[in-house]
Image (spheres, helix red, strand yellow):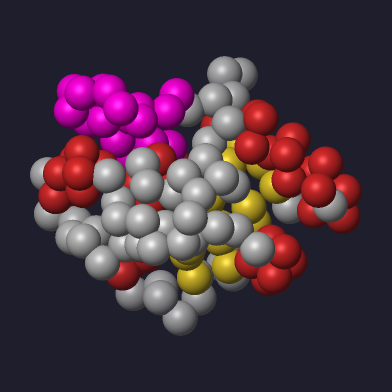
Amino acid sequence: MNILFLCTGNTCRSPIAEFLLKDLIQKEGLEDKVNVSSAGLATANGLEISKYSLLALKERKIDAKAHKSIMVTKEDLLNSDLILTMTIAHKEKIINFDMSLKNKIYTLKEYLNRKDLDIKDPFLKDFEVYKSTRDEIEKLIIELFEKIKNNL
């Protein structure tokens, strides 16, 4: 199964989601069954993960130093079994780009049956906001992992 997380710049929210899920997958030994990546809708290739996202993950003993931003490509979208965005606007942008993707793209919260569909962007906010964003995403990722595990 190939899972792709999308946000705007691929330096804050989507790498947090990617690395949290990869950590759970690795701990359960499921790397051969689930591949996780992230990308951005409006970014440049090769940007470093934001300092505060890196620190927020480090608090969970996850090293994301090697992360570099990636601009999403059509190939990334087509090769993904599940595309999870951070906001409804991200989802709509992808569906407007290619309607054939509508059956495999959701906001992360929508996929987990939440009413509020957006995860706010912590970009240019202080570390406390990043930690709060990490905590929000972490709860969702734990639930997502259980859902994925039950469907393997």
Q: Which residue ends up furthest to the bottom in the rendered image?
A: 32
How many marks on residues? 0
Q: Is residue 142 left or right of residue 79?
A: left
Q: Is residue 100 left or right of residue 6?
A: right
Q: Position of residue 67 (x, y in %)?
A: 32, 62
Q: Position of residue 105 (x, y in %)?
A: 70, 47
Instruction: From the viewer's side, name the closer residue of 65 and 85.
Output: 65
Instruction: From the viewer's side, name the closer residue of 4 and 124.
Output: 124
Q: Residue at x 40, y 75 (%)?
A: 31
Up-down relation of residue 3 to residue 8 (above or below)? below
Q: Position of residue 89 (x, y in %)?
A: 66, 30
53 within the magenta span: no
Q: Which span of residues is magenta-colored?
A: 120-141
Q: Is residue 131 left or right of residue 108?
A: left
Q: Residue at x 30, y 35 (%)?
A: 134
Q: Residue at x 20, y 38 (%)?
A: 52
Instruction: From the viewer's side, name the closer residue of 108 and 50.
Output: 50
Instruction: From the viewer's side, name the closer residue of 120 and 140.
Output: 120
Up-down relation of residue 92 to residue 79 (above or below)? above
Quadrant in the picture for residue 27:
bottom left
The chief SS type of the magenta part is helix
Q: Residue at x 87, y 48 (%)?
A: 99
131 within the magenta span: yes
Q: Is residue 132 left or right of residue 148?
A: left
Residue 113 seen: no
Q: Position of residue 128 (x, y in %)?
A: 18, 23
